[in-house]
C-alpha cells in the first residue's frame, strides 16, 4: 500500500499536460525559457533547436523570459536538417518588441541551394510589415507588402498565415486580422539547404529588440488558434487533479 501511495502522490503533483506541443504541424516552439549553452530548446516534437550566435541577453517577456537580439546577434536554425518543413501551409506567430528603425528587420528567413534569393521575408518595415515567400523555382507564392505598421518599444503580437488550399495569406496583429491577399495555390519551398534563421537576412536587415513565444507551423492555423497563442492558452497547463484522490480511494477500500 505504501508503494501505491507514493506512485499516486507523485502522479498527483507531477503530471501536467501541454495542450499544443503534440500538434504534428508544430515545427518550432521557442519559449526562450529553456536555453543551455546558447542552445534554445524547441518544445515541438521535432526538436528543431536554435543556436544563439553573438551572445544574446534575456529580459522579462510576455511569458517568462524574452530574447534580446541586435546587430550580429541572431538565432541559427539548421536548415538542411530541419524536420517537418512547411509545404502546403505556413504560420509564424510571435511577440515582438522592437526598436524603431529606418531599415527592414528580419524575423525569419531561409535560403536553399536552388537559387540564392531568400525564401521567406517576414520583416518589420517602416512602411508596413512584409510577409513574403518565393519557392524553389524562385516564383512568388505569397506577398503582403506593405502590411500593418507596427510601432516599436511596445509589445505586439504578430501572426502571418499562408493556406495553399484556400489560396490566402493573412496577417494578424494583436489577434485582429489586418491584411489578407490572394496567393498562388502552389507548394512552398522545401529546400532550406543553405541556411535558416531568426534575426537577419544575409547579414543585414538585423532585428533589434525583444522576441518571445516564437511559433512556426507547417499549416495555416485558424483565427481562434492565433488568439489562443496570443492569450497563452494554446499551451495551457492543466494539472490532473483527479489523481490526488487516488490514495483516498485506495485507503477507503483497504
Image: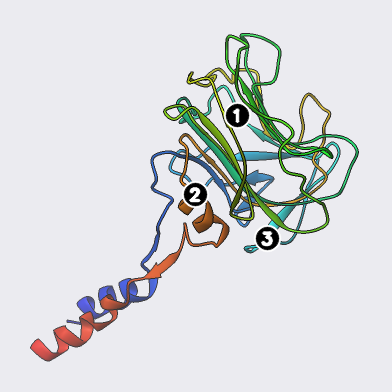
The residue carrying mark 3 is 65
Name of the residue lying farthest toward the bottom: 252
Find numbered disc 2 in the image and state the secondary structure of the residue it sits on. helix
Quarter holding the C terminus is: bottom left
Point out the tag, 1 or 3, that comes first from the N-terminus: 3
For discs 2 and 1, the disc positioned in front in the rendered view: 2
Q: Of 69 and 97, which appears nearest the observer?
A: 97
Point out the tag, 3 or 2, that comes first from the N-terminus: 3
| Residue drawn at the location 77% of the way across and 45% of the way down | 149
Mark 1 is surrounded, within 10 Å at the Cα level, by few (under 14), some (14 to 19) or many (20 or more) other residues, namely some
Point out the tag, 2 or 1, that comes first from the N-terminus: 1
The residue carrying mark 1 is 78
| Residue drawn at the location 29% of the way across and 80% of the way down | 244
Mark 2 is surrounded, within 10 Å at the Cα level, by few (under 14), some (14 to 19) or many (20 or more) other residues, namely some
Find numbered disc 3 in the image and state the secondary structure of the residue it sits on. strand
- The answer to whether 87 appears left or right of 63 in the picture is left
Image spot of residue 248 (x, y percent): 20, 87
| Residue drawn at the location 22% of the way across and 76% of the way down | 3
Quarter holding the N terminus is: bottom left
Mark 3 is surrounded, within 10 Å at the Cα level, by few (under 14), some (14 to 19) or many (20 or more) other residues, namely some
Q: Which mark is residue 223?
A: 2
Q: How many marks?
A: 3
Q: Of 197 and 249, which appears nearest the observer?
A: 197
Image spot of residue 239 (x, y percent): 38, 72
Image spot of residue 2 (x, y percent): 22, 82
The colour scheme applied to this rendered structure is: rainbow
For discs 3 and 2, the disc positioned in front in the rendered view: 2
Q: CA distance from mark 3 to mark 2?
A: 25 Å
Amino acid at each position: 500500500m505504501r508503494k501505491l501511495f507514493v506512485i499516486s502522490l507523485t502522479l498527483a503533483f507531477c503530471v501536467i499536460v501541454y495542450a499544443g506541443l503534440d500538434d504534428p504541424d508544430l515545427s518550432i516552439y521557442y519559449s526562450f525559457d529553456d536555453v543551455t549553452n546558447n542552445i534554445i530548446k524547441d518544445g515541438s516534437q521535432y526538436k528543431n533547436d536554435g543556436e544563439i550566435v553573438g551572445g544574446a541577453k534575456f529580459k522579462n517577456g510576455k511569458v517568462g523570459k524574452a530574447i534580446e537580439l541586435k546587430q550580429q546577434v541572431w538565432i541559427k536554425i539548421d536548415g538542411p536538417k530541419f524536420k517537418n518543413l512547411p509545404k502546403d501551409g505556413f504560420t509564424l506567430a510571435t511577440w515582438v518588441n522592437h526598436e524603431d528603425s529606418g531599415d527592414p528587420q528580419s524575423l525569419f528567413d531561409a535560403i536553399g541551394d536552388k537559387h540564392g534569393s531568400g525564401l521567406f521575408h517576414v520583416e518589420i518595415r517602416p512602411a508596413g510589415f512584409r510577409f513574403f515567400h518565393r519557392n524553389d523555382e524562385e516564383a512568388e507564392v505569397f506577398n503582403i507588402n506593405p502590411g500593418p505598421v507596427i510601432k516599436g518599444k511596445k509589445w505586439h503580437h504578430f501572426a502571418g498565415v499562408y493556406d495553399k488550399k484556400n489560396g490566402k495569406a493573412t496577417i494578424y496583429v494583436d489577434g485582429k486580422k489586418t491584411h489578407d491577399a490572394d496567393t498562388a495555390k502552389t507548394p512552398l519551398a522545401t529546400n532550406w539547404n543553405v541556411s535558416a534563421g531568426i534575426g537577419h537576412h544575409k547579414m543585414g536587415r538585423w532585428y533589434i529588440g525583444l522576441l518571445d513565444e516564437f511559433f512556426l507551423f507547417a499549416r495555416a492555423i485558424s483565427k481562434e488558434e492565433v488568439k489562443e497563442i496570443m492569450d497563452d492558452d494554446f499551451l495551457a497547463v492543466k494539472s490532473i487533479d483527479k489523481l490526488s484522490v487516488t490514495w483516498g480511494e485506495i485507503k477507503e477500500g483497504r
